[in-house]
Amino acid sequence: MTKTAVVTAGTAGIGLETALGLAGAGFSVTVVGRNADRGDQAVGRINATNPARPARFLPADLGSLDQVRALADRIAAEHAASGEPLTVLVNNVGAMFPERQTLDGIEASFVVNHLSPYLLTELLLPTLTAGAPSRIVNVTSSAVGLAKRAFDTVEPPGGYYGFHWYGRAKLANLAYTLDLATRLEGTGVSVFAADPGGAATDMTNGTLTDPKIVSPALRLLWPLVRRKFERSTSGPASLAARPSIVAATDDTLAGQTGIVIGAQARPMAPLRAATDARVAQDVRRLSERHAPLAAT
């Protein structure tokens, strides 16, 4: 049976290394990204490894919910027409913003790190279910540990601090991931979170030098915290991709779901807040309100 995978933000960094790993495991890989030149380069690198089937690139700005919908429609239609299953979806996309920005009128961190992968996943659930056994892998972050845990609104009260807001969006996505795993039990679709631990990527390079990305309470300690974080994000992207590759391919995980694969590429306990049913319920309501499955 043909094994197919879609990797978002798959043209560089951890996403590209994930795509390379999946191609090496026998998957026909589609990488998604904004830049066609980087997409062509990524496809060239994957195809140079002599995969069983050539890779391909699909353009989409994952900061636009309308483009996420169009991407999902295209992928679903193509799989329906070909009869090939969609075996794996890796939501690798992520971004941290030093200054507050909005996308589609919604705070950018929450859009890119949660609403975009949430919407793509929900729209592709019929395709993934039809292709079962299949897997969804959502990339998380250790930054969830510093996140505010109230999700009655997209933006928490107080000032904007990029690192904390990034972590809060990732916490929302982790809570959604674990909740989705429970929701899909018995469907043949397994759901995992993968914590890459860290790597030197476009997102980490330069962003962490600005102390304004953290709250005043942490700012005095930020040079020490930052150095520790930078040491953990100095490894190669190929190492940081291992948790996603394991979550997507490891045969010992067959039939299992709702597991976080940690930076050592082994299962780990999730942050307690991500398992709170009230947090999951608030995240679900917020997601449905701001990223409806049908465009309005």
Image (spheres, rainbow, N blue to C red):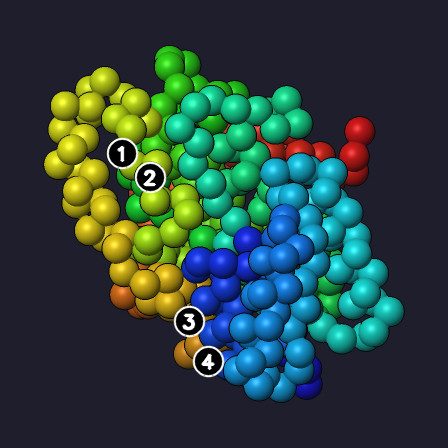
| Mark closer to the chain start, 1 or 4 | 1
Q: CA distance from mark 4 to mark 3?
A: 9 Å
**Mark 3 closeness class: few <14, some 14–19, many ≥20 residues within 10 Å:** many
Which residue has dot 1 on it?
209
Residue at coordinates 20% horizontally, 20% vertically from top-left? 217
Residue 5 in view here: no
Relative to the observer, which residue lies in front, 278 or 57? 57
Horizontally, residue 20 falls left or right of residue 206, namely right
Q: Amino acid at mark 4?
A: Asp
Quarter of the image containing the C terminus?
A: top right
Q: CA distance from mark 2 to mark 3?
A: 29 Å
Q: Are marks 1 and 2 in contact (CB under 8 Å)?
A: yes
Disc 1 versus disc 4: nearer the observer: 1
| Mark closer to the chain start, 4 or 2 | 2
Residue at coordinates 73% horizontally, 51% vertically from top-left? 71
| Mark closer to the chain start, 1 or 3 | 1
Disc 2 versus disc 3: nearer the observer: 2
Residue 162 in view here: yes
Which residue has dot 2 on it?
206
Which residue has dot 4 on it?
251
Which residue has dot 3 on it?
246
Residue 69 falls in image quadrant? top right
Q: Amino acid at mark 3?
A: Val
**How far across and how far down the image is residue 77, in percent?**
83, 61
Disc 4 versus disc 3: nearer the observer: 3
Rendered view: 83 above or below 225: below
